[in-house]
Image: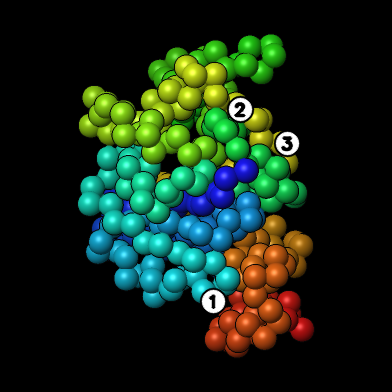
């Protein structure tokens, strides 16, 4: 299998969260006890990915660098990619062409949060060697998402972006697995009526070549899109409830790095000591002990 790299889309204007995001990138907003960006970063780390491109606006880059640095502290390598203007999800593959080279990729939207037992193993199992893979997640409001229609054998019949009359309740979460043809396919995409390079168009190129698979998200896996006020606070409540009940923190990059052997006890302890007066730091300290 070719090497796989990760991409996080963390640019855009965050207009669905105005006025909160007029002065701050939405991916830096808190989801309970950690910045939103920690959640998609954790998802890619759970996939076992250590080379990650973070796509963001030039004016926000230094904020992410202050928070995450180059990733060395948690045993990964973060490359910052400038997005001059938000022009669709598929634009990620034009922006990251040099970063990816001949590698396969996992692309995640920066406001998508995934929580579930065994989700890391599920992700690792589905890294693609060829073609593309998406997940399907049952939702009550499919008209707000990309929607997949399947036949009785789980073959894809159609994919539509925010249809007025959805043909199913299976939404496509913002997590996509692609082989190394994604850059070439994205280069040949045309801009839509919204003047964007649509991820649905990229997926349909794979589908037309019989190279797109879908896997239904297992029951018990939580998927939240924290892109508006209601979902942002719902995500915070969800994380708070689970963490308080279980006494375990969710989507902690330092813990994932430690469990995977990317950092050692001493490195984890130094990270914990830097936040020793917070619940987050005390949790890291408990791991190092």
Can you see residue 257?
yes
> CA gap, disc 3 to disc 2?
15 Å
Rendered location of residue 273, percent (x, y): 60, 88
Q: Residues within 10 Å of mark 3 (few under 14, many from 20)?
A: few
> CA gap, disc 2 to disc 1?
35 Å
> CA gap, disc 1 to disc 3?
34 Å
The tag on residue 219 is: 3
Rendered location of residue 48, percent (x, y): 63, 56
Rendered location of residue 64, percent (x, y): 39, 67
> For this view, does 267 lie left or right of residue 165?
right
**Marks 1 and 3: which is nearer the front?**
1
Residue 251: name its quadrant: bottom right
Q: Which residue is at a point 54% across and 19% down the rendered structure image?
A: 210
> Of 95 and 154, which appears nearest the observer?
95
Q: Which residue is at a point 48% across and 24% down the rendered structure image?
A: 206
> First in sequence: mark 1 or mark 3?
1
Rendered location of residue 106, percent (x, y): 52, 45
When the figure is inspected, residue 91 is found, relative to residue 37, above or below; the finding is above
Q: Secondary structure at mark 1?
A: helix
Quarter of the image where the N terminus is located: top right
Pointer 2 with pointer 1, Cβ within 8 A: no
The tag on residue 214 is: 2
Looking at the picture, the colour scheme in use is: rainbow
Q: Secondary structure at mark 3?
A: loop
Which residue does the numbered mark 1 point to in the structure image? 73
**Marks 3 and 2: which is nearer the front?**
2
């Amino acid at each position: 299998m070719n090497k796989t790299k990760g991409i996080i889309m963390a640019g855009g204007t965050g207009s669905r969260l105005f006025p909160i995001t007029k002065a701050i990138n939405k991916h830096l907003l808190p989801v309970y006890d950690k910045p939103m960006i920690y959640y998609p970063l954790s998802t890619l780390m759970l996939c076992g990915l250590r080379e990650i491109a973070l796509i963001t606006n030039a004016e926000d880059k230094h904020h992410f660098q202050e928070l995450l640095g180059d990733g060395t502290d948690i045993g990964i390598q973060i490359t910052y990619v400038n997005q001059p203007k938000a022009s669709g999800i598929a634009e990620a593959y034009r922006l990251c062409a040099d970063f990816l080279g001949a590698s396969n990729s996992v692309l995640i939207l920066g406001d998508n949060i995934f929580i579930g037992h065994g989700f890391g193993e599920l992700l690792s199992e589905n890294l693609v060697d060829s073609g593309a893979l998406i997940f399907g997640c049952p939702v009550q409001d499919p008209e707000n998402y990309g929607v997949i229609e399947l036949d009785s054998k789980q073959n894809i019949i159609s994919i539509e972006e925010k249809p007025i009359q959805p043909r199913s309740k299976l939404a496509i979460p913002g997590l996509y697995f692609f082989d190394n043809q994604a850059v070439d396919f994205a280069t040949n995409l045309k801009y839509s009526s919204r003047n964007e390079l649509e991820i649905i168009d990229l997926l349909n190129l794979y589908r037309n070549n019989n190279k797109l698979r879908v896997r239904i998200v297992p029951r018990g896996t939580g998927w939240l899109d924290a892109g508006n006020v209601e979902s942002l606070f719902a995500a915070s409540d969800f994380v708070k409830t689970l963490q308080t009940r279980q006494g375990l923190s969710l989507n902690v990059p330092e813990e994932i790095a430690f469990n995977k052997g990317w950092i050692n006890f001493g490195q984890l302890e130094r990270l914990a000591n830097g936040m020793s007066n917070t619940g987050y730091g005390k949790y890291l300290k408990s791991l190092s002990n």
